Amino acid sequence: MNWSKYSAPLAFYPLAGKMIPWFSIVAALAIAVGLYIGLLVAPTDFQQGEAYRIIFVHVPAAWMSMFLYVVMAVWAAVGLGLNARLSFMMTQAIAPTGAMFTFLALLTGAMWGKPTWGAWWVWDARLTSELILLFQYAGVMLLRTSIDDQRRADRASGVCALVGVVNIPIIYFSVQWWNTLHQGASVSMTAAPKMATIMLTGMLLMTFGFWMYSLAVILSRVRCVILERESLQVWSKPAAAAEVAEVR
Amino acid sequence: MSQPGLWEALRGIIWRDLLLAARRRSDAAISVLFLIIVASLFPLGVGPEPAVLRTIAAGVLWVAALLACLLSLGRVFTADYLDGVLEQMLLIAQPLPVLVAGKVFAHWVVSGLPVVLLSPLLGLQFGLEGEPLGMLVLSLLLGTPTLSMIGSIGAALVLGVRGSGLLVALLVLPLYVPVLIFGAGAVTSSMAGIGGEANLSLLGACLVLSLFFAPWATASALRIALE
């Protein structure tokens, strides 16, 4: 099977449409089971009490915020290197979801910090670098909207996204490099996790659910971007008409 | 007429930019005056306690230097973009990143070096003395070229874009944060008596990395802006 044909927006549009329901169902199931385990099954933490349960949202959101930035930068690199239109559309579609997860990570972090640390916000290396990530998402999105020429907007925001990748290792390793208030990683690839298996299961399920949710949302958004940008192409007119009819 | 060699082209670009700056001295003077005014506002706002001023000195002076650099970023490429010189620069048969590095170096000499030279005076105003004062100058000397390098990427990305002055701040300031932390950290840890050498090494690493990557990123941003 020749996968490269899906790099054309015309071919990708229906494929994305077919995939969205599946990703949505899997996301809803994973998040439902993850929340059930996290809120009802997992035992109360010995030190932090019930407040720790926010990690079932906080940690997956923080992981997704960094992961989506890297994915966005990879699509930008593919677009700049191979000059593929769809890659830039993916970059454009990923940015809002990534920014949303960054904001969610900061918000849930603040909600956890108040009862545990006694402060909504501390100027800790990881918190600060996550905040900077939010600014970077904003910068990439704003740069795109301030340039009228579509091609230049794509390429300039792509370069901007690529330059910002330097922040990702800084966020990830900030708890190791600096001795800060934010605790170190409890889950790593190389060592046994420092948490109960049931908690880990809940957290990984939530992460998987957030991942599938991102895919569903990003694919829906990229379909809108395709319709918007290809509105002058002949093929997109019936597709757009069908879409509008479906909504009505 | 034969094509200029690499060094000849680089020297030519640096010399031209410095000459242009020398003919329009008010431009460079504005960013220096801006630095002095911003730094002088803090004692008025925070209050003239010498102990307080000494504690905030490193942060305030570094932030002021950062803003002064940000303010002058518009001058790196805009004039050349408007009168078409930049387009000719892209056509020169020499690698564009090298030419960009030349332009950024000239920008640093005009807007970064005065900040470094002025910093001992401002440091004294804030009650810094001895080793911390020297550390302030050293950290600025290592850090301001990095600021110019990173800033040039943002300046090239927003070339000719509406609202570019504010946009460049949003794009560049997040990337300035490590330099600010290490620069101010060098002075603070030297005041605490543990020496600022570790922070200076990190600043040096930032400089080397930005010298290597920034001209390349700026060159590709310029190509995008002018294609």
Image: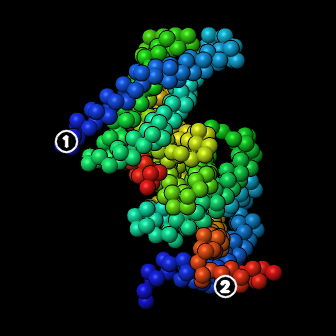
Whether residue B187 is visible: no
Q: Circle 1 sits in a helix, a strand or a loop, which is it?
A: loop
How far apart are the alpha carbons under marks 2 and 1? 59 Å
Name which quarter of the figure residue A102 lies in: bottom right
What residue is drawn where x is 76% and y is 83%?
Answer: A246
| Residue A5 percent location from the top left of the image | 46, 82
Name which quarter of the figure residue A42 lies in: bottom right
Q: In this view, does A201 lie above or below A173?
A: below
How crowded is the residue under tag 1: few (<14 C-alpha within 10 Å), some, or many (20+)?
few
Front-most of B171 and A122? B171
Q: In this view, does A158 lie above or below B71?
A: below
Left or right: B210 with respect to A37? left
The amino acid pointed to by label 2 is: Pro
Left or right: B84 with respect to A147? left
Q: Mark 1 points at which residue?
A: B1
| Label 1 chain ID | B
How crowded is the residue under tag 2: few (<14 C-alpha within 10 Å), some, or many (20+)?
few
The amino acid pointed to by label 1 is: Met
Q: In what quadrant of the picture does the N terminus of chain A appear?
A: bottom left
Q: Circle 2 sits in a helix, a strand or a loop, which is it?
A: helix
Residue lying at the far front in this picture: please name it: B1
Q: In what quadrant of the picture does the C terminus of chain A appear?
A: bottom right
What residue is drawn where x is 53% and y is 55%?
Answer: A157
Front-most of A2 and A108? A2
Res A238 label? 2
| Residue A18 percent location from the top left of the image | 62, 85
Q: In this view, does A145 lie above or below B41?
A: below
Q: Are dots 2 and 1 in contact, CB under 8 Å?
A: no
Left or right: A242 with respect to B4? right
